């Protein structure tokens, strides 16, 4: 089994070896993934400490943002990787330096340090630890059901270097006879890239990454009488423009049968209209579907999109930018229509391995993400493809 425990997602897949030189594997259990990577440990810590430090004043002369930023960096590089959270080691505390902090026993503050009880620290890790263990356990059980015994689990990705994860997996699977392989830290960051190089050098007898599902997102479109989908559903008059629109259409950007690279990038330009007093929420939903011959431009609730599965939503709120005067004053689209804002923006879709990141970028042509979501698309590929 290969378990890629990264920052956003953890992905697992189980193989049997068909050929050693060049290495060729056969998938025996469909891949699975979950959003339980190491970023969720950081989020739990930040939420807790941000609340505890909300009304705290540091000593005079200490730049608050700088020392707090350094404290979170120390957690990422030291404590997160090396703390011991085994069940018999949970008494006591770990410490993060925070220069200028005054002692406050009620908040577990010591002079210049924040004390974090190890039991609290383990709660920060819980989603990532349990999520990873559940994925591995499900793969092991699925392999047994198919007549295979999983003997080794190769751990890759940044989270695999975390001692708390290693201890937790040993506690959970000690009786299974599983051997966990943890590459040395100097190799862990390059394992996937080296594998890609070996694969690129010799692709003989190797599979392509072919989609067995469709991935799409919603958008509202101006009515086009020449578009079969629009003609089939009719349109709604948009009071802000006086034009007809079809709302919440799904466009399937990656379709069943498509051969996808390991890394792929999509950029599209879009716009939305808003009333002057309306909240500027740019909203798109992500969908997954296994239907054959998926067609674009039909509303999400249309029978042509039956079987769709909602896998994510991205919302970008631009109210702050409006308050700061980044947009031109609302204008009339044409005579006898209401005044409105027309917001132009880009959508960036980045595929990296089995993960897809969907982002709303403003201003268009830039790189500033105003909202994003990341999902696992491991189940979207033909089994045994890389």
Image (cartoon, helix red, strand yellow):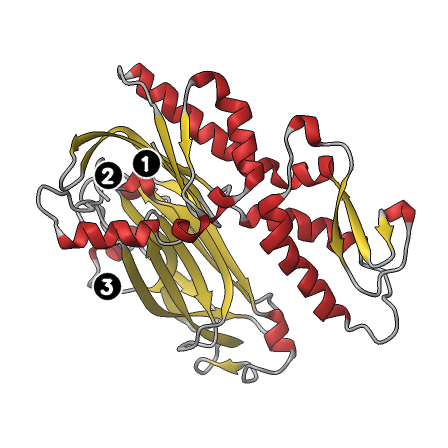
Q: How far apart are the two marked residues, 1 and 3, measured between alpha carbons? A: 27 Å
Q: How far apart are the two marked residues, 3 and 2, measured between alpha carbons? A: 26 Å
In the picture of the structure, the residue carrying the numbered disc 3 is 225
Q: Is residue 336 above or below residue 296?
A: below
The crowd level at tag 1 (other Cα within 10 Å; few <14, some 14-19, many 20+) is few
The image quarter containing residue 124 is top right
Picture quarter with the N terminus: top left
Front residue of 253 and 165? 165
| Residue 12 image point, x, y percent | 37, 36
Please tell me which residue is depicted at 60% across the width and 54% down the height of the picture.
Answer: 76
Q: Determine whether the residue tagged by mark 1 lies in a helix, strand or loop.
A: loop
The crowd level at tag 2 (other Cα within 10 Å; few <14, some 14-19, many 20+) is some
| Residue 309 image point, x, y percent | 38, 39
| Residue 227 image point, x, y percent | 22, 60
Q: Is residue 321 visible?
A: yes
The crowd level at tag 3 (other Cα within 10 Å; few <14, some 14-19, many 20+) is few
Please tell me which residue is depicted at 18% across the width and 39% down the height of the picture.
Answer: 23
In the picture of the structure, the residue carrying the numbered disc 1 is 307
Picture quarter with the C terminus: top left
Q: Which callout, 3 or 2, points at the residue further toward the start of the chain?
A: 3
Q: Determine whether the residue tagged by mark 2 lies in a helix, strand or loop.
A: loop
Please tell me which residue is depicted at 69% across the width and 26% down the height of the picture.
Answer: 88
In the picture of the structure, the residue carrying the numbered disc 2 is 291
């Amino acid at each position: 089994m290969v378990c890629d425990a990264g920052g956003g997602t953890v992905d697992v897949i189980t193989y049997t070896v068909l050929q050693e030189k060049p290495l060729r594997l056969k998938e025996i259990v469909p891949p699975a993934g979950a959003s339980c990577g190491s970023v969720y440990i950081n989020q739990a810590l930040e939420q807790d400490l941000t609340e505890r430090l909300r009304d705290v004043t540091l000593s005079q002369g200490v730049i608050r943002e700088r020392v707090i930023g350094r404290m979170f960096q120390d957690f990422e590089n030291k404590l997160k990787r090396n703390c011991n959270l085994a069940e018999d080691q949970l008494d006591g505390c770990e410490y993060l330096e925070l220069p200028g902090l005054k002692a406050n026993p009620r908040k577990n503050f010591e002079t210049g340090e924040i004390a974090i009880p190890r039991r609290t620290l383990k709660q920060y890790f819980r989603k990532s630890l349990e999520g990873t263990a559940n994925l591995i356990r499900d793969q092991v059980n699925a392999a047994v059901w198919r007549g295979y015994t999983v003997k080794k689990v190769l751990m890759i990705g940044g989270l695999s270097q975390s001692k708390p994860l290693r201890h937790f997996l040993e506690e959970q699977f000690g009786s299974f006879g599983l051997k966990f392989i943890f590459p040395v830290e100097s190799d862990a960051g390059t394992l996937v890239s080296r594998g890609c190089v070996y694969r690129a050098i010799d692709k003989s007898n190797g599979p392509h990454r072919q989609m067995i599902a469709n991935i799409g997102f919603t958008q509202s479109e101006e009515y086009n009488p020449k578009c079969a989908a629009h003609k089939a559903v009719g349109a709604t008059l948009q009071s802000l423009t006086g034009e007809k629109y079809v709302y919440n259409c799904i466009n399937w950007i990656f379709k069943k049968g498509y051969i996808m690279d390991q890394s792929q990038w999509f950029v599209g330009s879009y716009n939305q209209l808003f009333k002057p007093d309306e909240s500027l929420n740019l909203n798109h939903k992500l969908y997954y579907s296994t239907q054959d011959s998926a067609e674009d431009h039909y509303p999400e609730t249309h029978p042509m999109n039956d079987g769709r599965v909602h896998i994510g939503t991205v919302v970008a709120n631009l109210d702050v930018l409006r308050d700061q005067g980044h947009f031109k004053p609302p204008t009339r689209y044409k005579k006898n229509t209401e005044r409105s804002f027309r917001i132009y923006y880009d959508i960036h879709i980045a595929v990296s391995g089995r993960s897809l990141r969907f982002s709303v970028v403003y201003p268009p042509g830039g790189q500033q993400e105003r909202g994003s979501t990341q999902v696992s698309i491991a189940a979207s590929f033909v089994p045994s493809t890389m």
